[in-house]
Image (cartoon, rainbow, N blue to C red):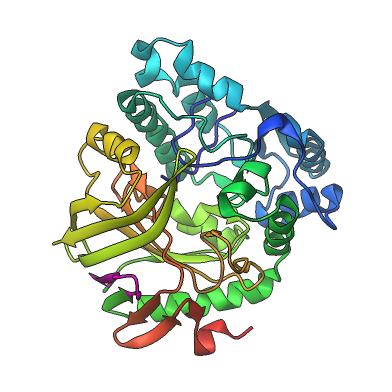
Amino acid sequence: MRTTWISAVAGTLVVGLIAAAPGGRPAPAPKVDYKELAHRLVAQNAGIHAGDLVLVTGGTRDLELLEDVAAEVAHVGGHPLIAIGSDRLTRMMYDEVPAKYDAGAAAFDTKLAGFVTAVIAVDYNESPGVLEGVPPARLAARAKAGALVDALLRQRRVRVVAMGNDLYPTAARAEQFGVSQDQLAEVFWSGVNVDYPALQATGEKVRRALAAGRQLRITNPNGTDLTVGIAGRPVYVSDGVISPADVRRGGAATTVWLPAGEVFETPVPGTAQGTVVADRYFFQGKTIENLRLDFKAGRLVAMTARTGLEPLKALYDAAGRGRDVFGVVDIGINPSVSLIPDSRMVGWMPAGMVTVGVGNNTWAGGSNSVGFGVDPFLPGSTLTVDGRVIVQNGTLQGEVARR
């Protein structure tokens, strides 16, 4: 499930958000100048200005970067607060804190969300399996509490820049993808350093194509064949820059994920019809093979898999109303993020990637705030809007792909 709030204070993380490498070794950062990166995060991505109250979160792995970000915030007249998190703290919130406190776990986060004007968050977790074995009811309770924080951030139009986007180059993620950590780092930092004006131009072209459409269809040789209605639905672009216009628009427009490069929208309710098949889906550090989701009238009516479904199904069963609602379609547009050949690598933002979401879709401008979400990546898919090909076999097409 995707969320905009990354808490390093209370350890309240929604399952599946971020993951990194054991041992706390700093991730490789080829050709990255942390001071220059910090300047870009503050000035370009988040648009920090004098008087801003900025929460800066991350882990000890990136403490130098967090310090540089805080100094940049202060340099422009803002007021930074650094908060540090860890896998150990995240797990202790379940292992050493009684379940009766789960419902109120986000109380301090809510206070913070009530007065900060911006958040710059760097992915800090160290293991995809950090939440493995936690009772699903506890995960659902804390996710529900965290959803209230997300809602307050959007209501107040707080600018949120989240660096990681399920691609942070750590040893654990590299192993999961079947690549070296150095290879993954090259891909990650290339994506972060994308040509932002060009990315914005591509995003606007894709946005217009979706905004003018009535029906969207996704197909894939693996058996995926899904149609959804999109007429009149708002379309958002995560292009890496939160502009004044984005702040005026509010809601999903005030959050960007880095590496950036996504165009997404929530469908007309009740219109999703067909089947989605993900060859593999990573969940709590394990792999679910051949995940199949069947939809009728906008709702999930069957969820099966060849292997590994049990933990995801348990969390689904523990979630509340809205867990079965088809929620979002997401199209990757970043040309600087390429899937490594012969790997298991996936991601939101590679140009031509198609991702769908079930359950919570508030991050995408929707109204379903259930504390559950499953977001399978569908590499190699074809996506059409009213018959016009936008993505073909995993490649962004025609005018929308030109820089």
* Residue 356 x/y as whole percent: 36, 60
Q: Quadrant of the C terminus?
A: bottom right
Q: Is residue 80 magenta?
A: no
Residue 114 percent location from the top left of the image? 50, 31
Above or below, 158 against 291 in this view is above
Instruction: Name the side, left or right, on which 367 lies relative to 127.
Output: left
* Magenta segment: 219-230
Q: Is residue 9 visible?
A: no
Q: Nearer the viewer, residue 281 or 137?
A: 281
Front-lying residue, 185 or 330: 185
Give the residue at x 34% y 11%.
100
* Left or right of 341 on screen, residue 105: left
Q: Residue at x 56, y 77 (%)?
A: 202
Up the image or down, 297 lies above or below 200; here it is above
Q: Position of residue 117 (x, y in %)?
A: 59, 40
- Please name the residue shown 33% across and 81% down the image: 385
Q: Which image quarter: residue 381? A: bottom left
